[in-house]
Amino acid sequence: MAWFYAAEWPTFAPPLTIQTGTYARRHQVWDFNTPLPEPLRPITYARLLRQHGYRTGYFGKYGIGDNSKATKEVLADFDEYRSFDEYYTADDTARQWHHNRRISDLAQRFLRHSPAEHPFCLTLGFKAPHAKDDGDPVMGPYVSEPDMLQLYEHDIFRRGTTMNEQAFATLPPYIQKSEARHRWEQRFSNDALWQDSVHKYFGLVSGMDRAIGQILDMLEASGQLDNTMIVFSSDNGYMLGDYGLEGKWFGYEASIRVPLLISPPGGTRGQDVAAPVLNVDLAPTMLHMAGMAVPSRMQGKDLSPLFGGKPPADWRKDFLYEHYLPKLYSYSAGMESFLPSSEGVRGERYTYLRYPRQPGANEMLFDRQNDPDELRNLAKTADPALMTAMRRRTDELIAKGS
């Protein structure tokens, strides 16, 4: 069996979570500069699959311990790899080789050199639709391929129900003053900016879709598609102006919900599965489907029991949300005002969040059943027993995740 995994990647902890099947509380990597810890290096899915006879490849944005010796050693677990982050390289003055195109070309070359009878695991780290934070002289933050942008030139997009100042007013001051608001001002603060940013964002997504389609076409032409398991996901959601913010650093649904599409070998009837699944589940699933034992240090679940559409009776009902940043971070020592750290639990009905490094009222509780837009913070008015239960459950999940 072969593996093809594609994702928009990365932001802080999730890439290591995906590779090792462990929570950030265990791998302790909260920034782009820290490499994969030595105790966890033996259990990345790439290393284990390679040891099991798979030909492995990685192309695209990596972002884990950038440029460190240890990271280069981890990338060496891939038979072929190329780590690159720019949408266009400086010498590509004609702008012919977008990040999406380079990934597609490298992936197709990898597949051409993979014998049909030899299993492979190919991981692709798309930068799209991530913003170019320092801006692009032509496109600005969202560097769409021009022909993909043209697909939407006649469209007018409509804002969602939380993309307004009323929703922004529900936020605590430490979120209102965060970097997420600053970036909103640059990219979404008036209708012309919002339309321009969203058009280019959709163009980026369509360009990524084209690149993946080219790879799938190649697999089909070579007869490998039916024996290849395909996984598409992202490492974060994204606020396109939701709550007057930009980014993905908070526990709101717009930030934590991500796409996940899995096509098992041989295909299966398309279906939606409502059970909560997490990025810690991807590595255990890959190993299980390859017929391998899942290391005990991995904390995720094998997702294959969900392929029939009905979750097992003991499937998780809630999960830990965590977005921490180190106190001493490369941006500045005042990182908590830049992006406040948070943690909490998302259950079947309620989402509980807390910002433990913020003084005063630093908790949130949302009843998504009655308030799906998460506009009414019930932390001060909810039943004290419910608040106590949510706090204890958060502590319990943190302890399990460590």
Image (spheres, rainbow, N blue to C red):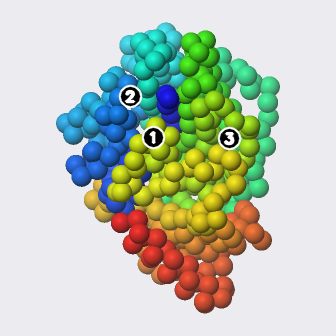
Relative to 69, 251 lies left or right: right
Relative to 151, 365 lies left or right: left
Whether the residues at callouts 3 and 2 have beta carbons within 8 Å, the answer is no
- Residue 73 image position (x, y, % from top left): 23, 34
| Residue under label 3 | 194
Identify the residue shown where x is 46% and y is 71%: 397
**Residue 50 vertical position relative to residue 184 in the rendered view, above or below:** above
Disc with the residue nearer the chain's start (3 vs 2): 2
| Residue under label 1 | 291
Disc with the residue nearer the chain's start (2 vs 1): 2
Q: Quadrant of residue 74?
A: top left
**Mark 2: which secondary structure?**
loop
**Mark 3: which secondary structure?**
helix
- Crowd rating for badge 2 (residues with CA inside 10 Å; few <14, some 14–19, many 20+): many
Disc with the residue nearer the chain's start (3 vs 1): 3
- Crowd rating for badge 3 (residues with CA inside 10 Å; few <14, some 14–19, many 20+): many
In this view, the residue in front, 306 or 153, is: 306
3D distance between C-alphas at marks 2 and 1:
12 Å
- Residue 43 image position (x, y, % from top left): 32, 46
| Residue under label 2 | 54
- Residue 156 image position (x, y, % from top left): 79, 34
Relative to 272, 177 lies left or right: left
